[in-house]
Every structure is written in structure tokens, then in C-alpha cells.
Image (tube, rainbow, N blue to C red):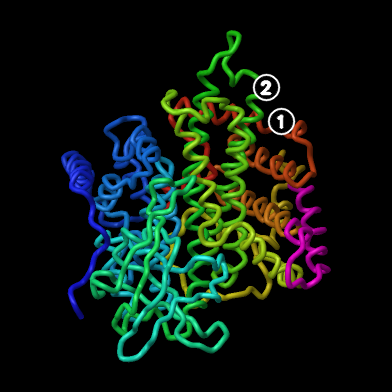
């Protein structure tokens, strides 16, 4: 092979900026992460990132807005995070990294996204690009691990111009012989230009069918200089600074041992990878939600009207509380996705679709409700930090299309209607609650248990009526029982739904309502598993979440739910005064 080619280099000024941030953090002794990136390291990572309101933080709100306005990549910020070592949390322990419990990197990405979704997208993409190698196993996993732990970005080359979400229609070709020659254009791809390597989905067989596609690891440092060229960065509405660009490969020569998995297994590995990456991407939405809730809570506490704060007005408290309930629901669903990957990987084809639809959609609803609450300031820059609100809102809208958009994920739920409605043995509800427990650490996912379809849907979803029974006479039980009755009706409707080549609007509506019921099951299970279960804060949180879900399902009016929403807002304001967020996961970090 001739001399290798790298992606276009950074300008000297940008490289100097990266060195400056890295050097500054080194001076404070905060660059290197703890040796083990377990749940106890989350607090260390949060402390390393610093207070985003401070100009000297690794990722400051002021600088993030400046970069966003200039559509500039956060080079210095990513360099600092690399120096700290977050990428080690993307590599399973068996391959030399720190990845065990998948909720650890998810939580760290959430913390990063809480400062800047663009930075979190840019860094977290490496996990998405690499996970196929962990599923395939073998020597390629070690090769991938060597790239990732250095901090070099890995992109995921799935999509192509004009082909939408139909991966089976991939046109990129990989001719496999003694070596592999890859020809095609991947676009639009996150980190296509800046990434060192790309996991490319390519056609290795002319025959129709799912076995015609394979995955190839293209390491740009090992590819001929003339074989690669780049398509320009796409101007996006959200995550403006991200490297959303394209890579053209012209008979790029790659070693035969750089196949990711067996030839013809590319689509299967991608579909199984998506079952893990979909929950991970929801951490981006949670970070955006954290940012929005912090802004709205501060605004409510400090904005004065006619001698009173905004938080003193009942309608304002209810609006704020409903948005916080949405954020807590999203948190519980994200957590359920992580636990499901470890406990019931054979159900992740359905669970990951439910999680990936529900979290970004719920956070988007949160932003829609809070935009008039914050008012004109939500669209302005430089107003006491409130200008970050519109950036976080725009960024979250993009998260919804990552790893399958809402239509794709609801379509997957529709395809599972027969499994959801199929009779099954009663669910061991105590085992479900135990699966949500905070105390037991997990090893990396048993990826051999991942399946392309489920046999009996989701145990968490099926457990909803039994979980509601566990609530007894708690205040949250009233709305919970209404949701459980609606769930029974929806299951019957799913069983009677026609098999459609093109799903109808009614089928999509049914899938969305089932997703909301899944959210109720996640919230109840998370609450029952938490150390604080049954406490006063627990009652406030769960009642507000379930009332909010009942409103979204049309089972209650927003007026009826206003009191529990207002109580949650009051709790959030009290916690904010102590510099603490309201969370469903109190005690998780301490329950190793």
C-alpha cells in the first residue's frame, strides 16, 4: 500500500486551543480519569467538566453558544474529554477497557450533553461506530479497542444519499478477496471527516436478501492516500458544530481481517448493534432536558411579577412540574433500556425501539411546553444563560433521528404487535423490580442473546398490571390503575390489528400509546427498586409522572393533574436551592 491518508488537519489556531484546554485541566490535576470507570467515576467526570456557568470550565455555556453560532466543532472540549479518558468507558473490560454496566457511559454522556449536546454527539459517536466489533468478537474487537482507547474517533458508515432508513438498499460495494476493495459514498455521517476510522456497511454479494451485506472497518491510517475524499459538512439546524459530512471511498484497499463479523452478517450485526445504541443515544436527550429544567427552574425562582416570583403562581408551578415529570419519565425509560440490555437482551429489539421513540419524543414535548414558560428569552442569546435553551431545544430535535427516527421505531413496535398480544406465562413482578435494582453491578452485555425479534414482547411491558398492584393504595395508584386498564385494551387491539405492508395511522397511534404504557411500567419499576421508595419525594415524583402519562393518554385532564405537577415543581425548587436535581435515581451512584 502507498502512504496512508488522514482526514483534513486542524488549523494551527484550533489545535492550539485544544492544547490550551488540555493543559489547563492538566494543571488542576483533573485530566486523567480514575483507573476504573465504574459508577463512582461519574461524579469525578462531572467535577472534571466543571460548572458550565463559569468561563473556565472544560465546557462552558458561553463558549458552547459561541461555537454553535459559528457552526464550529468543539475541538478543545473534545480534546480535554479525550485526555480525561471517557473513551475507555466505550470498550468492554475483556478488550482492555472499562465498560461493564452500560448505564455508566450513558450517564457520563448525559452529563456531557447537559453542558453541550454537540460535544456529547461528537464524542459518543465512537461507541456507536465500535459496538459492532464487540458483538462480532474475535480479532477485530481487539483491533477496534486499540483505536478507541487512544481517543481516535470511530464513525458508523450506514446511511447513503437518497436511501433514507432502508439499509438493505445499500449501494456501497466491498469486493472481498485476498484483500477488500471498498467503493461507495457514505453520507451524512457523524465524524465522517474527523474520524480516524469508519465501520462501513457494504454490499459483498449481488444476490438479493439480508446476507448480501457485510461490515468493514476502514482505518484511514491504513488506506491509500488517493482512495478517500470527503463530502462537505452539512448545515444542520441543531448540533450545528458537529461534523456531519460524508466519505467517498474509491476502491479503498482494506486488509481481509478488517471484516467486522462474518461475510454476509453485516445487516444482522447492525440491527443487533442498534439494540444497544438506541438506548445510549437517549442520554443525549436527557442531557438536553437537564439543561432545560435547570434554566426553567432558575427562571421560575428568580423571575418576579407583581411582587411575587413566577414559582408562586399556581399555573406556572403546574407547567414547570409537568415538564419535570416528563424529564423523570425519560430518565426512568433510559434506565430501563440499560437494565434491559443486561437482564433481557433477547427482548431488546422491542425494548430499544420503545426507549428510542419515547425518550426523545417526551423531551421534545418538554421543550415545547417550556418555551412559552420561559418566554421570548428562550430564543435569545446572552440573557443570563437563558440563550442556551434554544440551542438545547434544537439539538434534541436532531437526537430523534439518530439510529432510526420515530417512524422507524414505531414501525418496529407495530411489527411486534403479535408478540405483544401473544399469551405468555405470568410475569414474576418481584424479579422485574429486582432487575431494576441499583445495587448489583453488571458485566458487559451477553450479546449472544440479542435477537432480531422477540417471542413474547417485553416482560417489563407485560408486568404493568402487576406493578400497579404493588402500589397498593399509594396516591399514584389511581392514575396507574387507569393506565393499566388502558393497557389491557391496547393489548387486545394489538392482537386484532391487521398485518399491513404499509402501517396505517391507526397502527402508529396504537404503537405510540403502547410506548406510553411501557413508560408507566418503567417509572413504577424504577421507583419500587429505589432506596427511597415510599418516601415523601418518591410519592411526589411517581404521582406526577403517572398523572402526566394519564393526560397524554387522554385518561385525565391537565387540570386534574395540576396539583401533582405543582407539588413536583415545589420539590424541584427545594432541591435546586440545595444545588441538587430531582431524579428517579437517588442512590444509584452509591449502590455499587
- Residue drawn 28% across the image and 48% down it: 75
Secondary structure mostly taken by the magenta-highlighted segment of the chain: helix
Quarter residue 96 falls in: bottom left
Residue 534: in sight, yes or no?
A: no
Residue 136 image offset from top left, x and y in percent: 41, 78
* Local SS, label 1: helix
Badge 1 crowding class, 10 Å Cα cut-off, few under 14, some 14 to 19, many 20 or more, is many
- Residue bearing the label numbered 2: 314
Question: In the rendered view of the protein, which quadrant contains the N terminus?
Answer: bottom left
Q: Say whether residue 489 is left or right of residue 81.
A: right
- Residue bearing the label numbered 1: 562
Residue 201: in sight, yes or no?
A: yes
Q: Say whether residue 435 is left or right of residue 51.
A: right
Residue 338 image offset from top left, x and y in percent: 51, 59
Extreme-bottom residue of the structure: 178
Residue 331 image offset from top left, x and y in percent: 54, 47
Q: Is residue 482 magenta?
A: yes
Question: In the rendered view of the protein, which quadrant contains the C terminus?
Answer: bottom left
Query: Which of the pair 268/94 is nearer the observer?
Result: 268
Query: Which of the pair 342/133 is nearer the observer?
Result: 133
Q: Is residue 190 above or below residue 325?
A: below
* Local SS, label 2: helix
Quarter residue 352 falls in: bottom right
Q: Which residues are magenta?
A: 480-509
- Residue drawn 54% across the image and 89% down it: 207
Q: Is residue 40 above or below residue 304?
A: below
Q: Gap in Å between the C-alphas at discs 1 and 2?
A: 9 Å
Q: Is residue 178 magenta?
A: no
Q: Are marks 1 and 2 in contact (CB under 8 Å)?
A: yes
Amino acid at each position: 500500500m502507498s502512504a496512508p491518508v488522514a482526514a483534513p488537519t486542524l488549523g494551527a489556531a484550533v489545535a492550539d486551543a485544544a492544547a490550551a484546554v488540555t493543559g489547563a485541566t492538566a494543571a488542576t490535576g483533573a485530566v486523567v480519569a480514575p483507573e476504573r470507570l465504574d459508577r463512582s467515576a461519574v461524579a469525578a467526570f462531572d467535577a472534571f467538566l466543571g460548572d458550565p456557568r463559569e468561563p473556565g470550565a472544560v465546557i462552558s455555556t458561553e463558549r458552547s453558544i459561541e461555537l454553535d453560532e459559528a457552526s464550529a466543532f468543539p475541538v478543545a472540549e473534545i480534546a480535554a474529554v479525550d485526555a480525561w479518558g471517557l473513551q475507555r468507558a466505550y470498550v468492554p473490560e475483556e478488550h482492555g477497557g472499562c465498560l461493564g454496566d452500560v448505564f455508566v457511559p450513558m450517564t457520563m454522556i448525559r452529563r456531557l450533553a447537559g453542558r453541550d449536546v454537540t460535544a456529547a454527539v461528537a464524542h459518543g459517536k465512537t461507541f456507536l461506530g465500535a459496538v459492532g466489533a464487540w458483538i462480532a468478537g474475535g480479532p477485530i474487537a481487539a483491533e477496534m479497542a486499540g483505536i478507541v482507547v487512544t481517543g481516535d474517533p470511530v464513525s458508523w458508515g450506514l446511511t447513503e444519499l437518497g436511501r433514507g432508513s432502508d439499509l438493505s438498499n445499500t449501494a456501497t460495494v466491498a469486493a472481498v478477496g485476498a484483500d477488500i476493495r471498498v467503493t461507495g459514498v457514505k453520507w451524512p455521517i457523524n465524524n465522517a471527516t474527523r474520524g480516524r476510522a469508519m465501520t462501513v456497511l457494504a454490499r459483498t454479494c449481488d444476490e438479493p436478501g439480508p446476507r448480501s451485506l457485510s461490515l468493514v472497518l476502514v482505518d484511514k491510517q491504513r488506506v491509500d492516500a488517493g482512495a478517500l475524499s470527503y463530502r462537505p459538512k452539512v448545515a444542520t439546524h441543531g448540533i450545528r458544530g458537529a461534523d456531519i459530512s460524508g466519505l467517498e471511498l474509491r476502491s479503498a484497499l482494506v486488509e481481509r481481517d478488517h471484516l467486522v463479523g462474518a461475510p454476509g452478517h453485516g445487516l444482522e450485526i447492525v440491527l443487533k448493534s442498534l439494540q444497544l445504541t438506541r438506548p445510549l443515544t437517549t442520554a443525549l436527550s436527557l442531557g438536553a432536558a437537564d439543561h432545560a429544567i435547570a434554566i426553567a427552574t432558575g427562571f421560575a425562582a428568580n423571575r418576579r411579577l407583581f411582587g411575587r416570583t413566577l414559582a408562586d403562581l399556581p399555573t406556572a408551578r403546574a407547567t414547570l412540574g409537568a415538564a419535570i415529570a416528563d424529564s423523570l419519565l425519560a430518565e426512568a425509560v433510559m434506565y430501563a433500556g440499560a437494565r434491559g440490555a443486561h437482564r433481557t437482551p433477547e427482548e431488546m429489539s422491542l425494548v430499544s425501539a420503545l426507549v428510542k421513540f419515547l425518550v426523545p419524543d417526551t423531551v421534545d414535548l418538554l421543550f415545547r411546553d417550556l418555551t412559552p414558560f420561559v418566554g421570548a428569552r428562550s430564543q435569545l442569546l446572552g440573557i443570563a444563560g437563558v440563550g442556551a435553551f434554544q440551542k438545547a431545544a434544537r439539538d434534541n430535535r436532531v437526537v430523534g433521528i439518530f439510529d432510526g427516527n420515530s417512524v422507524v421505531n414505531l414501525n418496529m413496535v407495530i411489527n411486534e404487535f403479535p408478540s405483544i398480544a401473544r399469551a405468555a406465562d405470568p410475569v414474576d413482578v418481584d424479579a422485574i423490580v429486582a432487575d431494576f435494582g441499583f445495587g448489583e453491578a453488571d458485566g458487559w452485555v451477553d450479546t449472544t442473546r440479542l435477537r432480531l425479534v422477540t417471542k413474547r414482547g417485553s416482560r417489563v411491558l407485560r408486568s404493568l398490571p402487576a406493578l400497579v398492584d404493588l402500589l397498593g393504595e399509594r396516591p399514584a395508584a389511581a392514575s396507574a390503575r387507569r393506565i393499566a386498564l388502558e393497557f389491557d385494551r391496547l393489548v387486545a387491539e394489538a392482537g386484532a390489528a391487521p398485518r399491513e405492508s404499509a402501517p396505517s395511522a391507526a397502527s402508529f397511534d396504537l404503537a405510540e400509546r403502547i410506548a406510553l404504557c411501557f413508560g408507566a411500567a418503567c417509572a413504577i419499576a424504577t421507583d419500587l427498586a429505589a432506596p427511597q421508595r415510599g418516601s415523601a419525594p418518591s410519592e411526589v415524583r411517581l404521582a406526577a409522572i403517572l398523572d402526566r402519562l394519564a393526560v397524554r393518554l387522554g385518561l385525565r385532564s391537565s387540570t386534574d393533574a395540576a396539583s401533582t405537577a405543582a407539588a413536583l415543581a415545589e420539590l424541584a425548587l427545594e432541591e435546586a436551592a440545595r444545588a441538587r436535581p430531582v431524579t428517579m435515581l437517588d442512590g444509584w451512584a452509591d449502590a455499587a
